[in-house]
Amino acid sequence: MKTRIFYMLLASLSLGSVVSCDIEEIPETTVSDANFWNSAADMRLAANFFYTTLPGLTSGDVSQDNWSTDAYPNTNGNPISDGSRSAPAESTDYNYYNIYQANKVIEKGPEVINKGADATQVNWYVGEARFFRAFYYFEMLKRFGGVPLITKTMSVDDPDIFLPRSSRDEVLKLIYEDLDFAISVLRSADELNAAKEYGRISKTGAEAFKSRVALFEGTRMKFHQYGDYRAHLTLAKEAAESVISSGQHALFSRAAAGEHGETQNDAYFNLFQEAGDGRANKENIVVKVYGLSRENSIISTPVQRYYEGNTVVPTQNFVDYYLMADGLPTSKSPLYQEPNETMTHAEYFEKKDPRMSFTLFKRGDEFISSSDYTIPNPSLQRSGYGIRKYANKEFWALQASYVDKPIIRYAEVLLNYAEAVYELDETISDTDLDKTINLIRERLPQVNIGTSSNPQFVSLPKLTNAFVTTNGLNMRDEIRRERKVELSFEGFAYWDLLRWKTAEIELPKTLYGSYLFSEYLTAEGQKWAEDTPVNDKNYIILQASSLRKFDPDRDYLWPLPISEIAKNPKLEQNPKW
């Protein structure tokens, strides 16, 4: 159950006008910038703004999966995914507004301390500002590479308002410095919970984010062949290891969720339900907090309606990554049965990694207020798959969900550690696999590989070096597979392709939907469009490879907005844009 939610602040660029909102009372007050910065409470109010900028469920990370091969948005495709975009005139992705806000809070910290405020408390909020500044710069680094580094507040006539681009190394240096400062001053997750401030950035939140940044850059350096990749991978490993050893976090189990804890079998599904909200779920490290209920709301999101609107539909390209219950991919497992005319959509889910059933809809799943799920709706889930995460029939009826969105969770930290260890020396011990990937697999329920009359339940096998060797697998591929299915539709897929330098291989491929099962055409009056294109194996073609391209000399970096280059003659456009 959620604890008290912290106040939210919307601020002007100068942070001179503040409006605070309590979830029970909504007082309004306006104060001047000169009179505001006097106490740790003022710093806290200012820092609250940053939490409004965390990516949401319908406007943030999920939509980024359309940029990969894991999802498809609509009948027209996505210009980032299919390579059809051009340099934009303007872009909200290249934006210093939030960075200016962070700079303001960082600068005001020493002033507030000099006025007699408690230095420890003031630095909590300076630490939050530096965490978020690192967060904002990392989002730009992923897209554009090096960008101008602005680390102070400036007026419009400041000569430094138009700077040349800094190098990747310089941007990363600032990110690491900001995160290290945050780590040194922020409270632990337990301390925040005890202070009834669940949802604020913790020490382990900053460490977990550092592991994400360092893994991204370390692997990007390795596979794009530049820089000292080992230094970054070592930082990724050490930061993840610090989170693991902190004792502040653990993988979520239903038993940990108090009133919700009847069974652990559906723990993965309940990560994305109200059962996974609050500090009882120690897997969530950084979250975007939504309201408690319609009556006690900060913000809500119509996430299930968003998924249903053909906005993000999973592809067969993604589904093919799921292992069978014997731990083998479909290409190697004797359990796998190729779809045929007599197989149903629900039967296709059988004998597979149970995360497939927790992530995607199948017949019988709770769906909407009037009925459970039957088969895909051709007008809403044209790939033949629908995302089940966050699905809740009560919230569907309200068109508003109050389930928190995990921005960073402990499972990612474990996967970051495993990948960093492997990529450092291209080997990983069974001990490290047991404390990371196999720990994640342990929470999954058993799968019936027999029949209803003669059941035979098995657990997904451990990933070990012997298992990989015996079955002719590749350890790197299996570590990446685990990441893809565990973190599915959480905004990682596209960026993973970029850092692994596999985008040039994957993105030009045809995007497929599911097998066109016979029941799609006949069941319950739903008719799949007669002109649905399929390949020679009867899989739906969402977008043919002839309509997709990726230029490796151009598309690993994004174009800077043309308007920014026009305003700042010191900016240079990325190659071939």
Image (cartoon, helix red, strand yellow):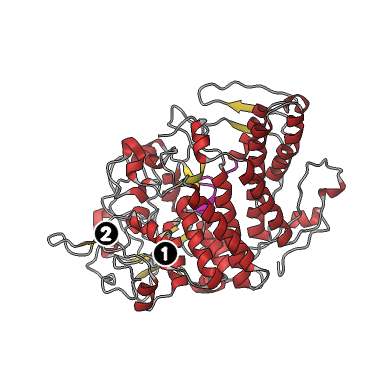
Magenta highlight: main SS: loop
Tell whether 54 sits left or right of 107: left
Q: Is residue 110 visible?
A: yes
Q: Which residue is mark 1?
A: 431
Q: Which range of residues does the magenta coloring cover?
A: 53-63
From the top left corner, tell me how far across and down residue 263 is, in percent: 28, 45
2 or 319: nearer the viewer:
2
Considering every residue shown, the one lying at the far left of the view is 453
The residue lying at 70 percent from left, 56 percent from top is 173
User: Could you tell me residue 577's position as x and y percent?
Assistant: 70, 66
544, above or below 234, in the image: below
Does the stretch in magenta take in 199? no
Q: Is residue 517 left or right of residue 568?
A: left
Q: Exactly how many numbered labels are in the figure?
A: 2
Name the kind of residue labelled 1 in the image: Thr
Q: Looking at the rendering, in which quadrant would you find the N terminus?
A: top left
Helix, strand or loop at label 1? It is: helix
Label 2, secondary structure: give it: loop
* Separation of residues labelled 2 and 1 (CA atoms): 36 Å
Q: Which mark is residue 346?
A: 2
